[in-house]
Amino acid sequence: MSKNISSTQKSYLAGFLDGDGSIYVRLKPNKSYKYGFQIAPYIVFFQSNKERLKFQKICDLIQLGYVRKRKDGILEYIISRQKAIIEFLCWIKPYVIIKKQQVALMEEILKKKETINDSKDFSELMQLIDKFRELNYSKKRKRHILTP
Amino acid sequence: MSKNISSTQKSYLAGFLDGDGSIYVRLKPNKSYKYGFQIAPYIVFFQSNKERLKFQKICDLIQLGYVRKRKDGILEYIISRQKAIIEFLCWIKPYVIIKKQQVALMEEILKKKETINDSKDFSELMQLIDKFRELNYSKKRKRHILTP
C-alpha cells in the first residue's frame, strides 16, 4: 500500500474519480452466504488500452487494486478489498465533489456490514445498496428482496 | 478570473480533466479569415444535467468559461478564450497525467498561432491541429489541406 501519497495526489485522484470513476456495491447471489448474497464493494476506473502506460502511472500511484482488460479492450483498475476501499475513500473524501454522496453511501454500507445481526439488518443493508442505483442512474432499477 | 486557486484545487482539476475532459482545436472554415479558417481552441468538461449543482461547483472554481446545455441534456463547461485556456493549462500542467500530450500540443499550437507569417506557416499550424485527432483517437481522420 502506498503510504506517502501527497495531498495534491489525493486531490488529483478525487478529480479523476469524479470524471471517470465508478463507486458501487454489487449483491451477488451466493447460497454459501448466510443471507444468500455476497456483498461486493467496488471502486473502478476505466481507460482505453491506448493510454495504458499513462493509466498505469495512476494505478501505480494508488496501489490498492488490480488492472483487468475487458473483452472490448477497455482497461479497468479495480479496488475491491474492503480495507483498500476504506483507505482510498479516506484519501479522496476531502476533495471529491461530484461523487460525494456515493462516497458517503459506501462508507455507510461498509460500516453497516460489520453490524449485521439478523435478516432485518441485512434487509436494511440491501436497501442501502439499492440506493447506488439511483445515485449512479442505472436504467435497470432491479430491486433486491431478501427471500427467507 | 479566479486567482486564489490552491494546489489541491489545481490537481483536482487535472484529475477531472484526465477523467472527463477534452482538449482540442477546431478549424472552422471561414472565408473572412486570411487563410480561410478560424482556429478555435477548446477545453471542455461534460456532465449529466442530474449533477448540475455539483458540476456548477467545479465551474465556479474554474471561472474561465461558460456552461452550455446540449440538446441531449448533457451539460458542457466550455473554456474557449485563448487567455483563459493558457491560464487553465498553467494550473493543471504540473499534475496532468493522461492528457499530458494534449496539453503540450495545445501550448505549441497557441504559440505557433502568434507567429504566422505566410501560408506555409499556416499549413504547419494545421498539421499540428490535425495531431489532436490522433491523440483524441477520433474515428474520423479528416485531414485539413490548405487550398490557396
Image: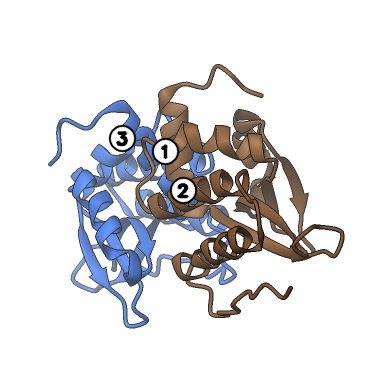
Chain colours: A brown, B blue
Instruction: Determine contact: label 3, label 1, CB under 8 Å.
Output: no
Is residue B8 left or right of A114 when viewed as pictured? left
Q: Secondary structure at mark 2?
A: helix
Q: Which residue is mark 2?
A: A103
> Disc 1 marks which amino acid?
Lys
3D distance between C-alphas at marks 2 and 1 = 7 Å
How many discs mark residues in the rendered view?
A: 3
Q: Residue at x 77, y 54 (%)?
A: A69
The answer for which chain carries disc 1 is: A
Q: Are marks 2 and 1 on the same chain?
A: yes
Q: Residue at x 23, y 45 (%)?
A: B62
Q: Secondary structure at mark 3?
A: helix
Circle 1: is it few (<14), some (14-19), or many (20+) Cα within 10 Å? some
Q: Residue at x 35, y 64 (%)?
A: B27
Q: Nearer the viewer, residue B32 or A73?
A: A73
Instruction: Tell me, yes or no, if residue A49 can be seen here.
Output: no
* Residue A93: image tag: 1
Q: Nearer the viewer, residue A110 or A140?
A: A110
> Disc 2 marks which amino acid?
Val
Image location of residue A36, percent across then percent down: 78, 65
The answer for which chain carries disc 2 is: A
Image location of residue B16, percent across then percent down: 41, 47
* Residue B9: image tag: 3
Image location of residue A74, percent across then percent down: 70, 58
Give the image quarter of residue A92.
top left
Seen as rendered, the residue at the extreme bottom is B71
Circle 3: is it few (<14), some (14-19), or many (20+) Cα within 10 Å? many
Which of discs 3 and 2 lies nearer the camera? The answer is 2
Is residue A52 left or right of B10 when viewed as pictured? right
> Disc 3 marks which amino acid?
Gln
3D distance between C-alphas at marks 3 and 1 = 13 Å
